[in-house]
Image (cartoon, helix red, strand yellow):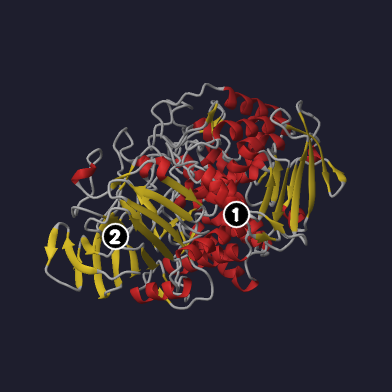
């Protein structure tokens, strides 16, 4: 939490940021971030020290309690705000996901008795780890500090992109030592092969290979110590290894005595390739021994990133906004070494590539909002995302689905890389030399056979007889991806491909059951599923993915006008939307991912993120403004439980970044941002091309949530959306807000998205 002490630090830590203007401003944007937001309940955000997109996310790993039916699910990031214990500090984490992996390379400073196994919940004296209190914990962008109360050790950490930096100050100097546990695991992760070698009295190197959500994860590391490492004892599990310099086994651990007369510092470099590269990463990124300088560098990097948007609002709203922007930069993460080497999905080392390779693509979530946000803010980074995806295609034969540390996890439904590739092409992020490869990757991926694609290839629906569950979810997501393939084919003048994919992106129509007014699974004989319950949301037991028929009724962002026609016209469409958000907020034995309810609208899960903006397509933008305002103000707060669901690698946060500025890419491939309800006085965006786009919301307040009229560069603007090209040219969009809706704003057919 942001305390008086940390605010004093922040006010003293100003930096210069130009924000795309000639008048440089002295602003420390990190003062507006509260990293604890989203760390309670189901937010699952990472809490610790990292830099934007950093491979190293250095922070605490706790005891994953089995206090409810989710069996440790709320500790997927390694941390939950309710816990008051720390087992150790690990160097990789997932943020906001629902999967249990990473938390690699645990290091714990300790005193007193040597323990080799982690303490069980509520019995900290029976294993390694320590109790903590929130009063003695400080966290801000790029920095984490906590008092390990059982050991009397103040632990601090910061990081660069590939190096984690620890500093331990021992108040209790009774047998000070370090524990390294390469077998430590959380949730579904399991070490398969580990190795640790004492190179000299200040250096350790090793690796940890594991199997989890990433089926074959390899982490190489190097540890440099500021103090000599004495009496190193190696163990495999709890069995002592009679070697002095090296140990190899399934669960290698080490206990190392140290001199705690002055603060002990460790620099830990990670590499996906080799221990030599891990050492090189340390030398390139943090060559000296100045923890405070490394912390200052991390703060500077966060300020440069957060300063891309100068957001003016009340203090509480500012904290929520900048924390959301902060969380939007946790993934994708860098997945190469400082020299350009990386481990490919083909398990080959690719040497000295001339682009930044990335991993942790939670694409089913992030194609909707996070990647479009990056197209505004990040030029080089966005181009490198695409280069990475094309390399993955060349290495594994298809575009990534959910990519993690050189592994394809095939998690979630559809082909979610295609919307990202298509949007990048249409917005000019793919070099002409790579455009044919990009379309080849998209077409090859779309012409697969698995998960019902063999039926889609033949322009047919996916029979529920061929899939036990989720057939409608797969089909609707395929249609969205096929729209991307269609747009790419048109852009590249591939007429035959364009005609084919145009038919495919309309296949969603085959699932519409007019009798019930929803998309419903169909048998091979053509009959729709019966019995049918549109509210049934049991996880992996219906035709939808983490949702029900009501929530999937709207998943046609690429062809909203076509969806309207299925309902019989725009008024019937609006009536159905109205009914959707007025239904009881009741879910029967549903997936915990379905959360943040407004009627049956679920803000806490991605398939509904575009829904408030659909009203604008029917000429009733004001209704969408009311819904999006309710979702923002009810389900995003400045408290630890301030996210209503998993942050999902930043998508929940990116939705808020957009929506709180009054715009959102409802269809992430048409270059349009639909208007909602801004929460700020103004937002000035330093665009990736060096220009500035400013949004002003005159008379905005908690009651004035409706757009009365809009101006673009000083001239009346009647449309309920703005285009990407307009934004990237720079300029000022002004909203005049009021307490009552102007029902005529955006009503005319020519003014709708």
In terms of secondary structure, where does tag 2 sit? strand
Q: Residue at x 29, y 69 (%)?
A: 206
Tell me the quarter of the image containing the C terminus. Answer: top right
- Confirm or deny contact between disc 2 and disc 1 (CB under 8 A): no
Q: Is residue 586 left or right of residue 707?
A: left
Q: Which residue is mark 2?
A: 210
- What is the x, y in percent for residue 146? 39, 49
- What is the x, y in percent for residue 298? 52, 61
- What is the x, y in percent for residue 665? 65, 47
Q: Which residue is mark 1?
A: 12
Eyeballing the image, is 156 above or below 160? above
Foreground label between 2 and 1: 1
Front-most of residues 662 and 509: 662
Q: What is the quadrant of residue 743 in the picture?
A: top right
Eyeballing the image, is 293 above or below 686? below
**How many discs mark residues in the rendered view?**
2
- Specify which label sits upstream in the sequence, 2 or 1: 1
Instruction: For residue 559, say whether it is visible.
Output: no
- What is the x, y in percent for residue 60? 37, 51
Front-most of residues 513 and 87: 87
Give the Cα distance between marks 2 and 1.
43 Å
In terms of secondary structure, where does tag 1 sit? helix
């Amino acid at each position: 939490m942001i305390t008086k002490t940390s605010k004093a630090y922040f006010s003293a830590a100003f930096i210069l940021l130009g924000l795309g203007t000639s008048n440089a401003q002295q602003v420390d944007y990190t003062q507006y971030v509260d990293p604890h937001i989203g760390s309670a309940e189901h937010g699952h955000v990472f809490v610790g020290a990292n830099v934007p997109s950093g491979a190293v996310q250095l922070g605490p790993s706790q005891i994953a309690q089995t206090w409810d039916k989710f069996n440790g699910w709320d500790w997927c990031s390694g941390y939950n705000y309710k816990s008051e214990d720390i087992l150790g500090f690990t160097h990789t984490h997932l943020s906001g996901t629902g999967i249990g992996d990473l938390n690699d390379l645990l290091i714990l400073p300790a005193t007193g008795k040597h323990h080799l196994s982690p303490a069980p919940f509520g019995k900290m004296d029976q294993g390694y780890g320590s109790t903590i209190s929130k009063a003695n914990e400080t966290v801000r962008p790029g920095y984490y500090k906590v008092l390990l109360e059982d050991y009397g050790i103040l632990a601090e950490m910061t990081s660069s992109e590939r190096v984690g930096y620890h500093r331990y100050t021992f108040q209790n100097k009774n047998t000070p030592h370090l524990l390294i546990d390469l077998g430590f695991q959380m949730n579904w992760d399991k070490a398969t092969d580990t190795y640790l070698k004492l190179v000299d009295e200040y250096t350790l190197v090793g690796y940890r290979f594991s199997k989890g959500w990433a089926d074959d994860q390899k982490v190489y590391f190097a540890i440099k110590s500021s103090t000599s490492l004495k009496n190193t004892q190696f163990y495999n599990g709890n069995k002592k290894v009679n070697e002095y310099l090296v140990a190899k086994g399934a669960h290698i651990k080490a206990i190392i005595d140290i001199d705690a007369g002055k603060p002990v510092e460790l620099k830990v470099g990670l590499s996906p390739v080799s221990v030599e590269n891990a050492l090189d990463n340390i030398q390139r990124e943090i060559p000296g021994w100045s923890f405070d300088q490394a912390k200052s560098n991390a703060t500077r990097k966060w300020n440069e990133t957060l300063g891309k948007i100068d957001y003016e609002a009340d203090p509480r709203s500012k904290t929520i906004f900048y924390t959301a922007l902060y969380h939007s930069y946790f993934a994708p993460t860098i997945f190469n070494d400082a020299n350009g080497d990386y481990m490919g999905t083909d398990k080959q080392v690719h040497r000295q590539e001339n682009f930044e390779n990335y991993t942790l693509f939670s694409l089913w979530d992030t194609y909707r909002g996070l990647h479009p946000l990056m197209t505004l803010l990040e030029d080089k980074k966005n181009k490198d995302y695409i280069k990475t995806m094309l390399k993955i295609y060349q290495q594994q034969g298809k575009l990534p689905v959910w990519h993690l540390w050189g592994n394809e996890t095939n998690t979630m439904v559809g082909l979610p890389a295609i919307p990202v590739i298509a949007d990048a092409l249409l917005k000019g992020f793919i070099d002409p030399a790579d455009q044919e490869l990009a379309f080849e990757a998209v077409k090859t991926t779309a012409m697969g056979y698995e998960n019902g694609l063999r039926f889609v290839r033949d322009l047919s629906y996916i029979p529920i007889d061929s899939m036990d569950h989720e057939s409608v979810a797969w089909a609707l997501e395929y249609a969205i991806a096929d729209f991307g393939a269609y747009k790419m084919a048109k852009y590249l003048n591939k007429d035959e491909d364009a005609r084919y994919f145009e038919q495919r992106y309309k296949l969603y129509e085959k699932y519409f059951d007019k009798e019930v007014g929803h998309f419903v699974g169909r048998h091979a004989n053509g009959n729709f599923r019966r019995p049918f319950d549109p509210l049934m949301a049991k996880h992996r037991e219906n035709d939808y993915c983490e949702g029900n028929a009501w929530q999937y009724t709207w998943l046609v962002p690429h062809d909203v006008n076509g969806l309207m026609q299925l309902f019989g016209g725009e008024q019937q469409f609006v009536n159905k939307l109205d009914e959707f958000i007025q239904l009881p907020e009741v879910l029967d034995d549903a997936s915990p991912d379905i959360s943040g309810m407004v009627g049956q609208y679920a803000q806490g899960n991605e398939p509904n993120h575009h829904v408030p903006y659909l009203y604008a397509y029917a000429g009733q933008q004001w209704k969408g403004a009311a819904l999006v305002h309710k979702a923002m103000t009810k389900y995003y707060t400045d408290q630890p439980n301030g996210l209503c669901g998993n942050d999902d690698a930043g998508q929940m946060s990116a939705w808020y970044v957009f929506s709180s500025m009054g715009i959102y890419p409802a269809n992430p491939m048409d270059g349009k941002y639909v208007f909602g309800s801004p929460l700020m006085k103004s937002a000035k965006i330093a665009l990736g091309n060096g220009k500035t786009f400013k949004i002003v919301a005159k008379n905005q307040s908690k009651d004035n949530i409706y757009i009365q009229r809009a101006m673009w560069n000083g001239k009346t603007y009647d449309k309920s959306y703005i285009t990407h090209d307009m934004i990237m040219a720079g300029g000022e969009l002004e909203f005049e807000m009021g307490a009552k809706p102007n029902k005529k704003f955006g009503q005319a057919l020519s003014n709708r998205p």
